[in-house]
Image: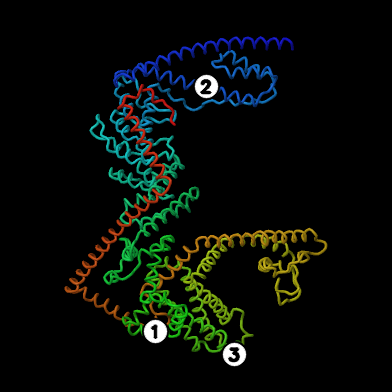
């Protein structure tokens, strides 16, 4: 122990001697430095009295800068030593004399390596069991080449915007000792630094002196420096006849770039949604690779997927992010609204296929929908809205008669509904235009008192047959034009449907009261009335199916319900005719078979009655109060369908288990009138068949099947089977009654909350879909008047036949060519008007976006950056003009 203490004391003495020599050396160095500073200060005072520029020599500047750098380094070491001393004071461990040794070692500057090793050994030997309190840090990344003093000055001058210093350094670089392509610790070269700080004059100077950068254009686009992009694209190198536009515009594969590995300037500019930069890039004849479908099996896609599937998927996402840019759509598409519709549909489909990037694709799809809505919001009058909403693309079928008659077809609005563009349809301008078309000549109805509104609706509802006859006889009269209004058509069709429901009630509750136990005649007078209404409703559905197509027809839940309802009623009357013709000999109901046609017809008729009344839910859509509730109910039914898939699997699994357990050796000696849960006295007979078990477990959810514990018992000798049966029933109770039902409640609550959060948008979209079905003139009259050929239909038929006959004559061919020319001229004129309106909308959209940017903090930051650049440039110019720059190395002043 004493030998150890002697060794430690000896080490302390050695350390003290070395520290004393180091202190003496530092004191002498400080005295020399002070003397040098005084000489430089006196010389500067003398030079200030001399003429400007007489004393500007690089040797003095270098000396001045070297002293400045050393002073800053010493100041840094002193601050570091003070921090280290404070940490050690808080974390002192061991004996007091050891802490004193460590404290003195941190205060001394320039400690030798030998003394540091001895101190480290002394410190570690005090407590070897305690863990280290400091973590050794080491730079394991690639060490870049050290830059020289002039290169650091060159990069700093580019960052500060000192044009004259950069120019002087480039002019003095005759021996090429200065590497103008050097990079700082962040890997930035002079061009990158100039672009990031928006020093465009320095950027032009660097390009003239041949400074190179592979990703300069990408940096300029990423920083959204429009002037830098313009300089790079229009730069003409002295040693080349053709600018390096091709090299700048090609796709760069840089693994260190932050955005993506495969990036092209136009893709990056579209990602930034910069309209000005994209305008410059598109003048260079750029192109984008067309994205292939997810399941594409071409040679290129197969090779890319095999090489790197993640890179291929990310590149497809980048391409679609580029195509979904509003700035790119406005610049490259003649019909931006249609392109936004198509892109949103493609992106929505991709989100369902590539579930790994679902959120990204859904975000892009929502971006396209918002862009189309914002573009429509720039319309200023009804004429512009009419041009936009009635425009037809070249791929859509054209209504030549409607084009010649300038009819309101609302093709673009129908297309928006087809693509599920809820934001576009629910936009305020679009809804106001729809209201105008909906009421038509009944525009004053909205301003009337509520009592007058109710009186008008009741009057039309009572006299709807008279109004229908008036339109049938004189469709072009004043009354006929009022009836042709979509609002009046809706009231008349509703009144006709209510009359149909009244006939159903009369047939079900009154007319057959005395004929329940007999077959009766096949069809009676009320049956013929119902059949007339059914034929009218079927004819209306057939016309819609013909004009809209099968896919669009089945997309509407209202059409699906109408199709099922009409099918049930037609099957009902067909079965009644069959029963009267083939089973007329059995008159009494008690002698009928369980599947007698009349009984089956009554069951189908009951289902038809239920669906008939449920169809009234779609009329609720026009109400702002009941409409959102009806939409929420529809969404809940969809979620219940998803839940049903899980519930049926659970029900089937427990049904199989219980049936397998209880159907062993089951025999019945007595005939029963009931089976399973339908018996008043319950037993485990309910589980002896698959159907009975399924009934019992289903109604058990609603507490209607009282399956008590004793029901699961066998005889006393089979306690194990009884326990298994009770366990299965109990598990079913936990899984279904407790878990799944609560899950269903949570799903329905989520669906309702989702609709409630977007209540206005969902309701306006659903109402627009209902309104559009009454805008055309295909189904003006309600059932049963729509099955009667009207004079208008006869005239159209006669004109079609006469045109077909005249088309085979010379005069008819000439007339047809003239009508085609007239139609083409009108189509061309309508397209030109659309392009004019679209140009106005695009310019207004850009103006509004610029105003939004100016009102945000981004504009404030940009203004501050511009002010900082102007002040820095003005300061440097004044320094060089007045000769205040004492040295070119004086650039290394603190940033703040």
The residue labelled by disc 3 is: 514
Q: Is residue 341 visible?
A: no
**Disc 2 from disc 3: Cα separation:** 111 Å
The residue labelled by disc 1 is: 467
Which dot, 3 or 1, sits closer to the camera? 1
Q: Nearer the viewer, residue 46 or 20?
A: 46
Q: Secondary structure at mark 1?
A: helix
Question: At which x and y percent is residue 72?
Answer: 47, 22
| Quadrant position of residue 268 | top left
Residue drawn at 36 percent across, 79 percent down:
482
Mark number displayed over residue 323: none
Residue drawn at 81 percent across, 64 percent down:
715
Please state, as top left, top right, bottom left or bottom right, where the C terminus lies in the image: top left
The residue labelled by disc 2 is: 77
Q: Secondary structure at mark 2?
A: helix
Which dot, 2 or 1, sits closer to the camera? 2
Q: In terms of sequence position, does the residue under pointer 2 or pointer 3 come before the other?
A: 2
Left or right relative to 384: residue 653? right
Question: At which x and y percent is residue 668?
Answer: 75, 72
């Amino acid at each position: 122990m004493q030998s150890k203490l002697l060794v430690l004391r000896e080490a302390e003495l050695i350390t003290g001697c070395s520290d004393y020599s180091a202190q003496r050396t530092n004191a002498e160095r400080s005295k020399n430095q002070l003397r040098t500073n005084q000489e430089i200060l006196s010389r500067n005072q003398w030079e200030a009295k001399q003429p400007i520029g007489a004393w500007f020599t690089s040797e003095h500047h270098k000396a001045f800068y070297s002293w400045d750098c050393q002073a800053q380094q010493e100041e840094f070491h002193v601050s570091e030593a003070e921090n280290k001393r404070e940490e050690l004071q808080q974390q002192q461990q061991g004996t007091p004399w050891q802490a004193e040794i460590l404290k003195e070692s941190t205060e001394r500057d320039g400690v030798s390596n030998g003394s540091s090793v001895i101190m480290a050994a002394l410190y570690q030997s005090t407590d070897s069991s305690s863990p280290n309190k400091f973590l050794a840090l080491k730079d394991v990344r690639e060490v870049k080449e050290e830059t020289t003093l002039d290169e650091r000055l060159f990069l700093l001058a580019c960052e500060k915007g000192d044009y004259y210093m950069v120019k002087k350094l480039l002019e003095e670089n005759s021996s090429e000792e200065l590497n103008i392509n050097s990079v700082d610790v962040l890997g930035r070269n002079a061009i990158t630094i100039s672009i990031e700080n928006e020093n465009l004059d320095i950027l032009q100077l660097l390009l003239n002196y041949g400074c190179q950068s592979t990703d300069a254009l990408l940096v300029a686009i990423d920083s959204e420096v429009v002037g830098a992009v313009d300089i790079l694209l229009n730069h003409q190198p002295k040693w080349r006849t053709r600018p390096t536009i091709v090299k700048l515009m090609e796709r760069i594969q840089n693994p260190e770039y932050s955005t993506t590995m495969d990036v092209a300037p136009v893709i990056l500019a579209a990602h930034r949604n910069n309209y000005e930069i994209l305008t410059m890039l598109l003048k260079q004849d750029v192109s984008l690779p067309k994205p292939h479908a997810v399941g594409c099996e071409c040679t290129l896609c197969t090779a890319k997927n095999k090489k790197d599937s993640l890179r291929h998927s990310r590149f497809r996402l980048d391409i679609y992010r580029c195509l979904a840019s509003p700035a790119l759509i406005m610049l490259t598409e003649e019909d931006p609204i249609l392109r936004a519709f198509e892109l949103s549909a493609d992106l929505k489909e991709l989100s369902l296929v590539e579930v790994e990037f679902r959120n990204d694709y859904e975000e892009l799809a929502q971006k396209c929908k918002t862009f189309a809505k914002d573009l429509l919001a720039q319309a200023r009058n009804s004429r512009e809205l009419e041009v936009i909403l009635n425009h037809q693309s070249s791929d859509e079928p054209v209504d030549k008669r409607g084009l010649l008659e300038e009819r309101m077809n609302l093709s673009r609005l129908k297309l928006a509904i087809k693509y599920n563009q809820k934001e576009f349809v629910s936009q305020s301008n679009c809804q106001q235009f729809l209201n105008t078309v909906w009421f038509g000549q009944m525009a004053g109805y909205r301003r009337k008192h509520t009592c007058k509104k109710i009186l008008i609706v009741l009057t039309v509802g009572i006299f709807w047959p008279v109004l229908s006859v008036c339109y049938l006889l004189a469709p072009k009269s004043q009354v006929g034009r009022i009836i042709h209004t979509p609002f009046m058509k809706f009231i008349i069709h509703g009144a006709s449907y209510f009359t149909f429901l009244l006939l159903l009630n009369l047939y079900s509750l009154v007319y057959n009261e005395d004929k329940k136990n007999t077959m009766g005649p096949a069809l009676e007078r009320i049956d013929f009335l119902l059949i007339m209404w059914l034929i009218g409703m079927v004819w209306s559905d057939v016309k819609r199916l013909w004009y809209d197509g099968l896919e669009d027809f089945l997309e509407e839940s209202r059409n699906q319900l109408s199709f099922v309802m009409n099918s049930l009623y037609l099957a009902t009357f067909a079965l009644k005719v069959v029963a009267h013709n083939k089973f007329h000999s059995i008159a009494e109901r008690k002698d009928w078979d369980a599947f007698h046609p009349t009984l089956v017809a009554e069951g189908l008729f009951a289902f038809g009655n239920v669906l008939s009344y449920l169809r009234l839910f779609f009329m609720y859509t026009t109400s702002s109060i009941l409409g959102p509730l009806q939409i929420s109910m529809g969404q809940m039914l969809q979620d219940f369908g998803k839940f049903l898939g899980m519930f049926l699997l659970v029900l089937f699994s427990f049904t199989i288990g219980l049936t397998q357990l209880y159907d062993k050796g089951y025999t019945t000696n007595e005939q029963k009138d009931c089976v399973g849960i339908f018996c008043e006295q319950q037993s485990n007979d309910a589980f002896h068949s698959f159907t009975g078990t399924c009934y019992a477990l289903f109604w058990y959810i609603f507490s209607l099947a009282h399956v008590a514990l004793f029901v699961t018992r066998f005889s006393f000798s089979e306690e194990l089977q009884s326990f298994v049966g009770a366990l299965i029933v109990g598990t079913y109770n936990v899984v279904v009654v407790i878990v799944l039902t609560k899950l269903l409640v949570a799903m329905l609550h989520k669906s309702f909350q989702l609709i409630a959060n977007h209540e206005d948008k969902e309701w306006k979209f659903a109402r627009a879909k209902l309104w559009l079905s009454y805008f055309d003139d295909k189904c003006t009259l309600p059932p049963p008047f729509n099955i009667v050929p009207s004079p208008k239909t006869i005239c159209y038929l006669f004109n079609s036949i006469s045109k077909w006959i005249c088309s085979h004559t010379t005069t008819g061919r000439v007339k047809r060519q003239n009508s085609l020319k007239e139609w083409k001229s009108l189509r061309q004129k309508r397209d030109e008007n659309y392009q004019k309106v679209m140009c106005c909308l695009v310019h207004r959209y850009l103006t509004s976006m610029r105003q939004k940017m100016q009102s945000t903090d981004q504009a404030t930051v940009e203004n501050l950056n511009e002010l900082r650049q102007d002040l820095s440039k003005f300061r440097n110019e004044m320094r060089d003009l007045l000769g205040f720059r004492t040295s070119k190395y004086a650039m290394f002043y603190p940033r703040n």
